[in-house]
């Protein structure tokens, strides 16, 4: 069983997936910081000081000055501002991944192998075939096998 596990874990796809998950987790932290610390303050300032993360409504009917105050009081809240932030995070991550995949695809196109020329023997055979066709009046080979 240990050998089977070693074989499974050493396969390329598993290792690539693990690396992708680890990089994705690190990238999530960067994107969260980008949205929270860099993008949302100017957006909030442009929109008149709006802080999306503090948008909520209380299901218990009380009025609270902030989301933290509602959470501290133990009120049930719908935190739609956090949802807006999560959507913005998603758009940024998906846009960044789109750009990465696009560039990788371009690199693959650039590195495509140029088809190799057929061996000299095949070229000669093709020339002979073409010459025979030209002599016979460009007729396709007969399917009649009777002599």
Image: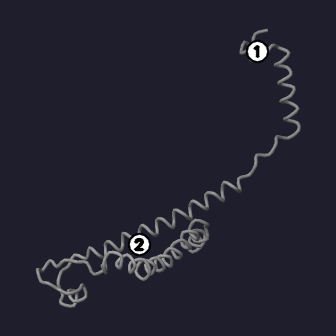
In percent of the image, x 61 and y 71: which residue is there? 10
In-image side of 28 versus 60 (left or right): right
Which badge, 2 or 1, is on the more N-terminal residue? 2
- The image shows residue 130, relative to residue 3, as above or below, that is above
Quarter of the image where the C terminus is located: top right
Q: x%, y% of residue 139?
A: 76, 15
- Nearer the observer, 61 or 40: 40
In percent of the image, x 37 and y 75: which residue is there? 43
Q: x%, y% of residue 106?
A: 63, 57
Identify the residue at the far left of this view.
Answer: 61
Q: Quadrant of residue 123?
A: top right
In-image side of 105 versus 112 (left or right): left
Res. 10 mark: none
Q: Which is closer to the viewer, label 2 or label 1?
A: 2
**CA–CA distance in space, label 2 to label 1:** 66 Å
In percent of the image, x 86 and y 30: which residue is there? 125
- Nearer the observer, 13 or 57: 57
Colour treatment of the image: one colour
Q: x%, y% of residue 85?
A: 35, 74
Quarter of the image where the N terminus is located: bottom right
- Nearer the observer, 75 or 143: 75
The residue where tag 1 is placed is: 139
Judging from the image, what secondary structure is the residue with disc 2 in? helix
The residue where tag 2 is placed is: 89
Judging from the image, what secondary structure is the residue with disc 1 in? loop
């Amino acid at each position: 069983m240990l050998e089977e596990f070693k074989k499974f874990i050493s396969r390329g796809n598993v290792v690539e997936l693990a690396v992708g998950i680890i990089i994705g987790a690190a990238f999530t932290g960067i994107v969260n910081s980008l949205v929270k610390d860099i993008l949302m303050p100017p957006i909030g300032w442009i929109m008149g000081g709006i802080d999306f993360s503090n948008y909520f409504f209380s299901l218990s009917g009380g009025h609270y000055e902030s989301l933290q105050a509602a959470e501290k009081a133990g009120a049930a809240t719908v935190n739609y501002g956090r949802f807006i932030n999560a959507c913005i995070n998603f758009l940024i991550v998906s846009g960044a991944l789109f750009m990465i995949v696009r560039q990788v695809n371009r690199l693959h196109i650039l590195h495509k192998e140029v088809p190799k020329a057929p061996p000299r023997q095949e070229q000669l055979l093709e020339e002979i075939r073409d010459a025979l066709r030209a002599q016979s009046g460009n007729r396709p080979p007969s399917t009649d096998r009777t002599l």
